[in-house]
Image (cartoon, grey):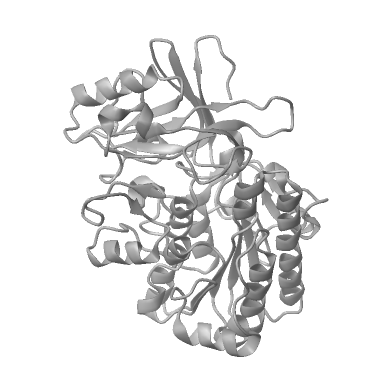
Amino acid sequence: MTAGSTLLVCFDGLRRDRARAERMPHLARFMAAGADMINARSVFPSETRVASTSTVTGCPPGLHGLVANQFIHRQVAPDGLFNTASHEALARADALGVLLDRESLGQRLARAGKSFAVVSTATPGATYMMSYGAAKLGQPLFSVHEGVGTPALMERAAAGFGPVPAAATPNTNRIDYAARVLTDIVYPEHRPDLAIFWMSDPDITSHGFGIDAPETIAAQRGCDEAFGRILDFWQSGDGPENIIVMSDHGHITGSARFDIAAALPDYAGLISPGTFSGLYLPDPSRQTIAAAVERLAAEPFCGLIFVNMPGDPEASVPGAIPASVMGGGHSRSAPVSFTLRASPAATAGEPETCLFAGGIEPGGGMHGGLTRGELSTVLAGAGPAFRTGFVSHTPCWLPDIAPTLLAILGLPADGTSGRALAETLTCRDHPAPAVTRRTLHASIGDHQQHVEQWLVDGRPITDFGWSAARGEAPA
């Protein structure tokens, strides 16, 4: 393969503390042998399409513009929610020029004359974003969903391996099929300089059964076995030089379903509901935003509250934190956004819990908010580009992945806001970054909220956040 060629492997929804050797021995050995970034974090909101877009643009949502898994975007969806799970909806936004404000990895590699490929079992929307521009650029894309992948590769896979298996939880059969496409077709026939292999588990199985359910543990093992076969292929010398493994977010336990619209009838039609919710006020002024924050803060279901003040994204009102300091604050972001209430784990080692708006049953896995369990991710690399047996304590997050990949490939990272993780690379020509810590506070009435962040060379990375009534313990 070409110098610097790299495969990025994502285990969707894998909490860092659940990437254990007894569940995922191949992954654990890989992480121990290479460079392991133990303080890796997701973006906020910790949602898959936001996360996949941040990964391939090297920017948080406040810069790239895909601000939530679903949100109010009247130019694209005049009468409802813009649901980014749909690749057709994303294509409509793209055609209107109101989807993405930063270049993707695929676009950057095409501009540099390098090859790029994606093999994904994720949703059509997540696959569309991680492969943004692939169809127009002639880059090979495989998806387990009909109508998403590039026709030539989809036809080649069907001819070689038969039809894509049916979706299931665990989704192991589809993941195994996709892994064969990667090792038996994409690498031998396309030899990409950079490839992404995205596994939909353990995320979808955790949503259905819970983080530590037998089904989810089986899903983790299925992913790990597929990864083990990819490692065998890699070690044979036929694949890329380097492999980076990641997860896009973690999971906590959804404790109870909550109807946000019923609780806020005066804001009917203005809310994009979820664990992370947006309130799109029709006349967002300082007064209307402050009134909405005060109303939300009085509600027991409300977690953390953020504001995107028109014309002044660094400003705030009592009881809220500016979305911009969390990596948000795009023009498509809601003037007011909030999380549903999360609670700490009942006992050590158990996941935190939260209210949820739908999509799962109580006890299922959920994400989107700011607890440690949602934000703490897997990130490690191995191959000639990476240090061996190295543990990096330097905080990092998803927007750092693209600059690191570009550095390995010898390409510029202009337009990204992340940082190439030079401390993990064998060719280290930069001093270790300066790391400090800060706590952000906001309160109004009995509602308090706090966000813990690192500042890495001045760039904020959120560790976790919590909300509480006065005197309550943090989640």
Identify which residue, 302 or 238, lies in the foreground. 302
Identified at 69% across, 24% down, the residue is 346
Please identify the residue farthest to the bottom as the structure is shown. Answer: 159
Q: Position of residue 217 (x, y in %)?
A: 75, 51
Q: Position of residue 191 (x, y in %)?
A: 57, 82
Please identify the residue farthest to the right as the structure is shown. Answer: 22
Identify which residue, 447 or 429, lies in the foreground. 447
Picture quarter with the C terminus: top right
Identified at 62% across, 79% down, the residue is 181
Q: Position of residue 276 (x, y in %)?
A: 43, 38
- 228 horizontally vs 334: left or right: right
Identified at 73% across, 52% down, the residue is 215
Please indicate, yes or no, whether residue 322 appears anywhere in the rendered image: no
Please identify the residue farthest to the front as the structure is shown. Answer: 262
Picture quarter with the N terminus: bottom right
Residue 177 falls in which quadrant of the image?
bottom right
Q: Position of residue 313 (x, y in %)?
A: 27, 35
Identify which residue, 392 or 232, lies in the foreground. 232
Q: Is residue 370 above or below residue 49?
A: above
Please indicate, yes or no, whether residue 123 appears anywhere in the rendered image: yes
